[in-house]
Amino acid sequence: MDALSLQLLFNGLALGAGYGLLALGFALAIRSAGAINFAHGDVAVAAAYVAVAGGALDLGGPAAAGLAIAAGAILGLSVAGLSWAPLRNRPIEATFIAAIAIGIVLQNALTASFGGAPQAPAQIASGGVHIGAVFMSWQALISLAAAAIAFMAVWAVLAKSQTGRRMRAAAEDPEIAAAHGIPVIRLAILAFAVAGALAGLAGVLLAAQHYATPGAGADYILKAYVAATAAGWGRILPTAAAAIAIALFETVGAALVSHAVAEALLYAGFVALLSFRPQGLGGEAKGKRA
Amino acid sequence: MSGYSLHLLALAGALAAGAIGWQIVFGLAGALSLAAGMAMGLGAYALTVLTLSGWPFGLALAAAAIGPALIFAALTGAIRRLESHYFALATLALAEIAVIIATNWESVTGGANGLLMTPAPAWLNSAEARAGFAWLAALAAAGAFYGFQRYFGREQLTLLRTEPLAARAFGIHAGPIRVAAMAVGALAGGLGGAAHAFTVGLVSPDVLAFKTMAAILAVVIIGGRRSPPASILLAVLVTWTPEWLRFLEQTYLIAYGALLLLAIWLAPEGLAALLAKATKALRLARDPDPPPLIGLKPVTEGGLTATGLTRRFGGITAVSDVDLALKSGQITGLIGPNGAGKSTLLNLVTGLDQPSAGTIQLTGRIGRTFQTLALAPALSALENVRAVGASSQYAWAALHAVGLTAEARKPASQLTQGAQRFLEIARALAARPGVLLLDEPAAGLTADKRQQLAHILRDAADAGAAVLVVEHDVPFLAALADSIVCMSEGRVIASGNPDAVTIDPAVITAYLGAPLADGAGS
Amino acid sequence: MTKDLLTIQKARIGAAGTALLGPLDFSIAAGEALALFGPNGAGKSTLLRAIMGLEALDAGKIIFDGEQVKGGDPGRMARACAGYVPEGRRVFPGLTARENMLAASDDPRAMRQTRLEEMLALFPPLTGRLKSEAWRLSGGEQQMLAIARALMRRPKLLLLDEPSLGLAPNTAASLFEALAAVRQSGVAILIAEQNAAAASRLASRAAVLVGGRIVADGPAPEIAEPNSLALAYLR
């Protein structure tokens, strides 16, 4: 492979790290609370802007990123409390509309506070290394490392720990889980908080490299959704693979044609895939949704 | 009125048209589409691009309405069977594609800066005319809303939204209705978008963007998703508040989000519903009197012959080589322990499921009830019966047959369990079926209600229907049925005269897990 | 006199006069096994769900181990040591058999593992299926799993809703053998069953529920005697 392709590959992977973290939080909410969180993308964007604000207050890149993660967790909990918990027993559209409403509030609050122009929080680290002909920025390497750690950690907790088992049980059958002493609501709240934190991390990493606007949440949620569903409805490791595939498609497409065309093709592919498999993209039969 | 106020009025009308168009999709068809902004945007772009290319204004306007309708019909055709979250995401994806195209296809759409419209023809060139056109669009949208509701039936659409599986069993299919709704909604939205475009004098990707969708969402949910008048009122408010609250600037948009959240928590059916509750008494008084009673003879005499019916699911055989004969005027009982295959057999016979082997010959129409009631709780008893397509006359006749005429106007949720069961039977009877299948109709009924049920079923059979009753209350069936079939583990283990079947040793073993001791018997 | 483990007092679900369930009065002593017979729709499942706290009562009380059970809090009943095996088994389909059992336990890890092995001793066929996802298990295996899962917390009372439903006769037989062992270990059992013969070998006492009310209550062999049972059902 020539130098350009390798560079594209690396860039795509780094982008995939950000999308992967986004999709991971989304999938976690599904696997452990059975909830489809429409506000997930907006939480990521809002957390990124918190990092921007932190930067304006002279916090360094790492501190701002930490702030974003914390903000994400808090926002994740708020979404749980405002849209998921109160509307659990209503028709599912109610939860979606509530989440969209939260998204509207977030988007407009951000526009009001920061304006509509694209912004980026400070990078966690500047500079990079050359490996062969490829330039690998520290920021990108940190993103990849963070994503890898996060995926392994979430996977390990869900697959191997007692908490993870109970979360999965609660998502599959909340009533029977409760009848076996599993604290369904508490676990769901934990899941939302962690998912929010992951969204915060994803938001700050993506925004640092690629800038964010207040309305970017819609793109984020679409990509998280595509990754989570293409991978078989929230299965953790396949979600990582799907996120990387999406990022590579976008990166290569942007280099070959344009970013806009690549994105449009991605979405069109998503719709086409859904229209051929209206029952979903697999794995959902066993899972549950809120 | 000042020129500026007229300008705002026109914008409000355009928004109202878009909102009402979306009400057809979400309020009537129950599909959560996030592409309402896209519909309006397509109309706006169609009008602008076509007039700039030299099309006559009237023709471009027509294209602005029909174009989005056709596009949405085609796109929805591809995604019509998706369940709610996938459907919403698919529409969001489509809307994003539209924004990308509008922002990047500069040669046609003018890119992010958009296009300036050519001046509208003279007759449309005053502020009054533009406002008038916008409100004509809104009224047309309202007309489309009520027309759509009339065409598909208010009760039918309600049943589709609240009990989609039952609706499917009664022939109301979500797919085609969604396509129609999205198409008509896009037509209304397209007109609204066109009105917006020539009021503002330009078009840009902003019209397509999600914030238009957000505004429509707020208007419709807060106002009332099935009330065009509420959308009109809210659209005016939403357009004017920036003026009143100019000092708050962006914050009023935040307020809409917060209000939307409040609405979905506390008043999900919107202000219109709250008002409707208050004026309920007035509306009831306006309802017409019941028509004169008529009989409920089946449309055609019914009968069913099934031979060798088998249904396998993977390694399990739920129904094995079952023969069943239902004759007009006769009541057949079907008994058997849980898991014997009775419900599967019912599904095979009514066509909700396909047999792995065997044949079914059916003459006449089929009507059935379900084990778990599938009534639309918000509709009245009468409306529930009409939801399956029965005319008013037959609906009343059916209610009379089950003794519920006094409760005809009560919402189904307010009826007692027993009354609800009878309502379900009325619903099956109203279609005047030749073959009537009932799944545990006596469950939860008190003794005197069971007597009533027996009379109802006997009357139905005497009127010519072939009746099959699945039940666990064996004495009830023994007194009522002309013959009884007993199933166990997928097979028929006894059939014939009720008295003989109920003391059949095989039947008792199946139920009790142990044969009678020798010499015992009743 | 043994203090009753479970007491139901004038419990009712549904409007008075046309109630789905009740008014009901009965109790179960610690270590006692009670079989519940009755036609479908009689309210057996509703009763078990009400005891487990999955349904709220419209009148009356349920007192378990000295504490009153309010509807809507099944977690409380689980923590108070009641185990529930629902109709249709309802194992967690995407979790393996091992995970199904472990998830139901509150113990520290070592104790969890020990208890798991105790369950495997009770249901040997599960040993070979530990790593399979629960939806792949056969009906009989799922039923064993559901019971093992409910037993993980060492309940004082085990509620079973139609455990032999859909099972082949010999599978059902080994199931009842295991339940007999459970009973011998001192766990009280309340079992709703259509298979009256097997249930009456397990339980010393039986009651018949028809139309939401108890129409007979006495020693199991008497109640389960086919003639009298048939009469009770076929009233």
Image: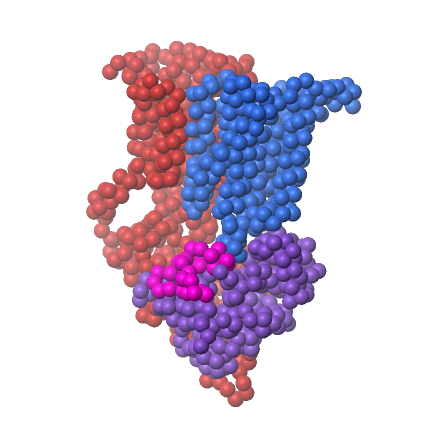
Residue C68 is one of the magenta-drawn residues: yes
Q: Residue furthest bottom?
A: B519
Residue A272 at what x, y percent from top left? 59, 34
Quadrant location of the N terminus of chain B in the rendered image: top left
Residue at (49, 77) in percent of width and height = C205
Q: How many marks?
A: 0
Figure colour of chain A: blue
In the rendered view, tell whether residue B36 sits above or below residue A27.
above
Q: Position of residue A107 (x, y in %)?
A: 46, 26
Classify residue B391 as left or right of residue B177.
left
Residue B322: within the magenta? no
Residue B475, by quadrant, is bottom left
Q: Which residue lies at the image location 64% right of the left edge and 32% below the top edge?
A: A147
- A101 vs A176, nearest the viewer: A176
Quick check: B354 left or right of A137?
left
Q: Who's the residue at 29% across and 13% down the image?
A: B3
Q: Which residues are magenta?
A: C53-79
Frontmost residue, A125 versus B188: A125
Residue A106 in picture, x, y percent from top left: 45, 28
Chain B: give its colour: red
Q: Nearer the viewer, residue B385 or C90?
A: C90
Residue at 27% in and 52% down: B409
The picture's colour for chain C is: purple
**Residue B354 in view, yes or no:** no
